[in-house]
Image: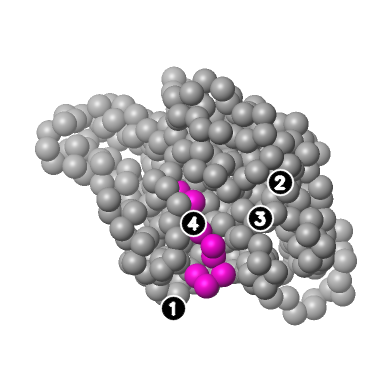
Amino acid sequence: MKVSLAELKQMYKPKLKPIIWDNDNNVLTLLDQSALPFETTYVNLKTPEEIASSIKLMKVRGAPAIGITAAYGMVTALTSSSISTLDEAIKSLNNAKKVLDKARPTAVNLSWATSNMLTKANEAINNGEVKNVKELIDLLKSEAKKIFDEELDAELQMGIYGLEKINDGDTVLTQCNAGGLATGTGLGTALAPVKVAQALGIKVSVIAPETRPWLQGSRLTVYELMTEGIPVTLISDTTVGLVMYKNMVNSVMVGADRILSDGHVYNKIGTFKEAVIAHELGIPFYALAPMSTFDLKNTVNDIVIEERDPDEVRTVRGVPIAPPGVKVYNPVFDVTPPKYVSGIITEKGIIYPPYDKNIRKVIEK
């Protein structure tokens, strides 16, 4: 079934609103994902430091959502303090960028968004587009909203392209949460084709691994899909191989926090395992991400995979499950080599191997 972007915008209205910007009071309101699914709590943030802390504590998570949040974080660098000159404004924006970029270094959308906002500010000042701080604030507010709007359009378009890979009655295996909570729009990347399919009356269900240690699958993906009325089955992370072996899965669709120019995909820990098993069993494996997630500059050797607090593994929501003080390795992401990736679904189309040639062709066209 074919549908245009304009038609889909009329048909699909996200039920979740993870990111809300109050333009009059200069307050960023986030749905606290660390409290889900047991509490629906919102946090109000007014400074880059507060926003960076919320990113680090995973009150907001997912590469696109972090990017949108960071963009508004740059706005608060100017609205949360008394700045009278454009020179002071640029200094404050540079400082905010440093604070925000350190919050989650692996997610490329974060630094992409802060760089975009800083570049926009410098260009506007240098070409005389803005003449005072108020005009600069208004410009950056518009730019942050543009990032949000473009993200939603990109996800809708990814949903349309991803629909080509879904048949009526399919079951999709995912990883972590790459839905609207992860992108801030309410739609998502990996879950976009599923939600678009549902909007068009195509039956599709999802299998969601729990995604230890933060349990984004059981807490967030299941919560999100149940809110949308989409059939979902929760499994333990260790059940992934069996459900694929038993032909319970038609395809794997995951998001991405960074995709390199040669097709290496960085995503939530556990993704590599899914890709290898899918490859072995002949199940297509797709990564879905917007253009802002692609990193054409770095190689695998350049990327530092973030490691988090060992107590996230030693405990579950504060309850000990291992001997105190046991040594822990807690990487947040893993990397999937391109040989295991059947296709990369973007807002510009589906990219197929060889990725070292085709990624740049699609991005630069």
Q: Which residues are magenta?
A: 338-346
**Viewer can see residue 345:** yes
Separation of disc 4 and disc 1 at Cα?
21 Å
Measured along the vertical axis of the image, is residue 299 above or below residue 175?
Answer: below
Give the amino acid at mark 1: Asn
The numbered mark at residue 327 is none
Residue pictured at 58% horizontal, 26% vertical: 12
Q: Left or right: where does residue 34 sit relative to residue 71?
A: right
Can you identify the residue that label 3 sits on?
251
Depicted 201 relative to depicted 358: above or below: above
Residue 170: which numbered mark, if any?
Answer: 2
Dot 4 falls on a residue whose secondary structure is strand
Looking at marks 4 and 1 on the same chain, the residue that comes earlier in the sequence is marked by: 1
Q: Residue at x 60, y 60 (%)?
A: 285
Q: First in sequence, mark 2 or 3: give its number.
A: 2
Residue receiving disc 1: 301
Give the residue type at disc 2: Asp
Q: How is the image coloured?
A: one colour
User: Was residue 92 drawn as part of the magenta stretch in this picture?
Assistant: no
Q: Quarter of the image containing the N terminus? A: top right
Q: Sequence-wise, which precedes: disc 1 or disc 3?
A: 3
* Label 2, label 4: how far apart the Cα atoms are: 19 Å
- Whole-number angstrom distance, CA of label 2 to CA of label 1: 37 Å
Q: Secondary structure at mark 3?
A: strand
User: What residue lies at 78% left-to-right and 43% top-to-bottom?
Assistant: 232
Please name the amino acid that badge 3 sits on. Ser
Per the image, the residue denoted by label 4 is 344
Badge 2, how many Cα within 10 Å: few under 14, some, many 20+? some
Q: Secondary structure at mark 1?
A: helix
In three-dimensional space, the C-alpha distance between marks 2 and 3, rounded to whole angstroms, equals: 8 Å
Of the numbered discs 3 and 4, the one sitting upstream in the chain is 3
**Residue 125 picture quarter:** top left
